[in-house]
Amino acid sequence: MINIKKYMVNSFEECTHVVWDETREAVIIDCGVYKFGERERLIRFIEEEHLCPVRLLLTHAHHDHLYGNDLIHERYGLLPEVHKDDEWIMKEHLPIRIAQIYKKYPYDIPMPEHYLTDGEVISFGNHSFKVIHTPGHSPGSVFFYCEDEGIAFSGDTVYDDDIGSSNLAGGNYDQLMDSIDYILQLLPDDTVIYPGHGKKTTIGQIKEHNRAIIGGPIF
């Protein structure tokens, strides 16, 4: 059985997720912890639960989803993993964007050694995620989908009652809507969605209540 701990962190109210199963192996998705207290609480939880982080995953490479990557790299030796189409954001855009926001950014920005691809399987403990490429919010945005548990992590592609922005680095509205259409057809209605901001939802709820989709171009 998969367990999920959500932290809503940093000034962007980003959702950092710790996911683990009975083996205590864990993956950390979109580690956006920025403030000292946020970073301390995350590590304390991992240690108190006796978890063993084995993967550090990014749904996309925007800055608010990776402030804590240096912490996880330093503590557990893990480097971030993001889709290959966001490589240029990590290497070129990200340092510039962070310099625009912060006069003096206090953390290192570790770079990936491995870039994810569509359909790749990420294993941990007795479970696995399938990488589903969903470009639009960023070129390399992805879902992490666990079919056995009926859950997925959507990043900023789609939320409970809205969709992600398409006017950020590498964003494209038509791609975003195509990706959402694809996901809504691909995943069962009872699939629980954990977005990068806001509350969890389901595919069925998104179809019925998402104000940015109802009556829009994908239906």
Image (spheres, grey):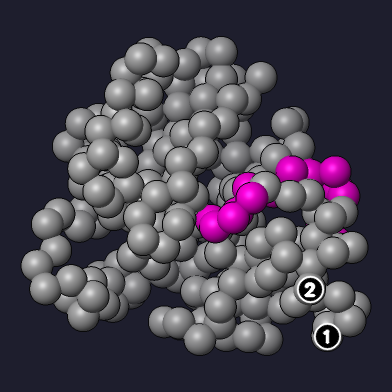
User: In this rendering, does residue 182 appear at all?
Assistant: no
Q: Which residue is mark 1?
A: 217
Residue at screen point 76% across, 37% down: 150
| Residue 80 higher or lower than 185, as above or below | above
- Residue 170 % position (x, y): 46, 82
Helix, strand or loop under label 2: loop
Check disc 2 and give the amino acid type.
Answer: Arg
Whether the residues at callouts 2 and 1 have beta carbons within 8 Å, the answer is no
Check disc 1 and give the amino acid type.
Answer: Pro
Between 152 and 64, the residue placed more toward the observer is 64
User: In this rendering, does residue 217 appear at all?
Assistant: yes
Q: Which residue is mark 2?
A: 211
Residues in magenta?
A: 184-199
- In front: label 2 or label 1: 2
Q: For residue 186: magenta?
A: yes
- Residue 35 % position (x, y): 25, 48
